[in-house]
Amino acid sequence: MSVSGRSFFFRFNAYLYTMSSHPIGIFDSGYGGLTVFRSIAALLPQYDYIYLGDNARAPYGNRSYETVHQYTLECVEWFFKMNCPLVILACNTASAKALRTIQQVDLPRIAPNNRVLGVIRPTAEMIGSYTDTNSVGVLGTRGTINSGSYEIEISKFFPEVSVHSLACPMWVPLVEYGEYNTDGADFFVGKYLQQLLAAAPDIDTILLACTHYPLLADKIKKHLPQGVKAISQGPIVADSLAEYLQRHPETELQLSKTGDVRFYTTDDTADFDNHASVFFGEKVRSTHLRLGHI
Ligand code: DGL
């Protein structure tokens, strides 16, 4: 077969594969969602997955509602083109600022049978069961904290729990730029934790309400007084997805189950692969995705 014939053959096979597979889409502004995806893939390895990090436009944390909605929707529409019947926004900022509009306004218009889920509600449903003092700290990006989403959602499930929130705007850049093991990271981790605990000394549970923060977990633990625990969302979201799929056979039956995992990034693939392997705990090989406007 000629070279051009072979290349057509491979592209045609890739096209056929894409058309026959119905993966779960996992989305984040960058690397953070990989901490959630890692737990999901460990608990539910039978499904096919596509992970997309919008690294070219990360971080989302300080961006407006309109921008976060526009960026997230573009990515969700791409997942739908890739045949994903179900997309998880493994990003608190996108869950806080874009999910509701996507579920209520966009989905009925563009794909009424597809589903998009976030990470805030499943976490809010569980977090009250970790605290003995009924006092929980929530750390996240400015976008997540200013949205008040955690206060609203936690009060629905645990009205007796008081929620003390603090934005940690330096933490995502530390992680995105690979500085999470440095003295600089120590300084900023200590700074925000002291601020939170000084404002509410009875806190015994701190929710890491940003999917980037588990990369700082060792430093966070080092700065926490005894008896105060930090909770990452990955295992909570994975359990909640497993339950969701049990309760929704109409979605579950659409999903393909060959254990195939693919990674896409809107930025440089070599950079993504290096960093992503740390977040995901396994070697990652990504494909570049060019969204229309980038
Ligand atoms: N990982 C995202 C989250 O959970 C935030 C990262 C960003 O600011 O883009 O909120």
Image (spheres, grey):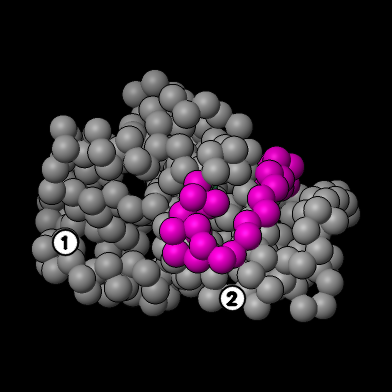
- Tag 2's secondary structure? helix
Q: Position of residue 33 (x, y in %)?
A: 49, 54
Q: Quadrant of residue 47?
A: bottom left
Along the line of sight, which residue is nearer the eye, 147 or 258? 147
At horizontal 53% and vertical 39% (from top left) the residue drawn is: 147
Question: How dense is the environment of label 2, judged by Cα within 10 Å: few (below 14), some, or many (20 and up)?
Answer: some
* Residue 224 lies within the magenta run: no
Q: Is residue 267 left or right of residue 82?
A: right
Q: What amino acid is labelled 1 in the image?
A: Thr
Residue drawn at x 57%, y 61% is: 279
Q: Vertical placement of 34 versus 67: above or below? A: below
Is there any visible trace of residue 13 in the rendered image?
no
The residue that label 1 is drawn on is 251
Disc 1 element? helix
**Circles 1 and 2: CB distance less than 8 Å?**
no
Specify the label residue 130 is tagged with. Answer: 2
Q: Residue at x 30, y 38 (%)?
A: 102
**Residue 201: percent from left, percent from top:** 81, 63
Position of residue 43 measured from the top left corner of the image (x, y, whole percent) = 39, 77
Check if residue 165 falls in the magenta segment. yes
Q: Is residue 28 left or right of residue 171?
A: left
* Residue sitting farthest toward the front: 160
Q: Earlier in the sequence, mark 1 or mark 2?
A: 2
Q: Is residue 3 left or right of residue 124?
A: left
Frontmost residue, 206 versus 163: 163
Q: Quadrant of the C terminus?
A: top left
Mark 1 to mark 2: distance in Å?
31 Å
Could one spot residue 131 in this view of the protein? yes
Range of the magenta residues?
Answer: 149-174
